[in-house]
Image (cartoon, rainbow, N blue to C red):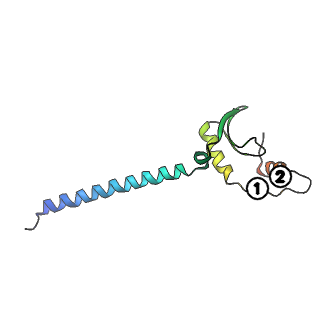
Amino acid sequence: MPLEREQQMMIVNAFCEAAATLRDAAQESYAAACELRRPCVQFKPRLFIDASRWCALFGENLQDGVAGFGESPDAAMWDFDRSWHVKLLVPPSGQSSHESNVSKLGIVH
């Protein structure tokens, strides 16, 4: 027995709503997975106030570790994520790696 037009439309609408719900769930899952892949989530840097701004530091100190700074903890963590991906720069002769990286990146302590 064939379905009436109204019943067909109810079924189509139900499938469309289910598809939208699944799409939204997939987008939320993707966003959560991206958040979990952030370096600050994976490596859990120490968070503290350094002078007048927040510092997220992974490692023993600023010279040997990776750090991010910001006016809020969130900003420091985003800066840490950015810093995590910065490649080490080769220092010119007579200059330490730290001095070279600090001068080329424009980092002010």
Given residues 108 and 89, the one toward you in this image is: 89
Residue shown at 80% from the left, 48% from the top: 102
Residue plotted at (79% across, 56% down)? 89
Would you call the spot at circle 2 few (<14 residues within 10 Å), some (14-19), or many (20 or more)?
some
Q: Residue furthest right?
A: 94
Marks 2 and 1 close (CB-CB < 8 Å): yes
Give residue 65's quadrant in the image: top right
**On residue 97, which mark appears?**
2
Identify the image quadrant of residue 61: top right
* Residue at the left extreme of this rendering: 1
- Residue 93 % position (x, y): 91, 57
Say what secondary structure mark 1 lies in. loop
Nearer-the-camera pick, 42 or 82: 42
Give the secondary structure at mark 2. helix
| Amino acid type, residue under disc 2 in the picture | Ser
Q: Amino acid at mark 1?
A: Leu
Residue 105: x and y in percent read 76, 50
Which of the image's four quarters has the N terminus?
Answer: bottom left
Residue name at image x 10 percent, y 63 percent: 4
Most extreme residue toward the bottom is 1
Task: State the residue position of label 1.
Answer: 88
Distance CA(mark 2)–CA(mark 1): 8 Å
Between discs 2 and 1, the one toward the N terminus: 1
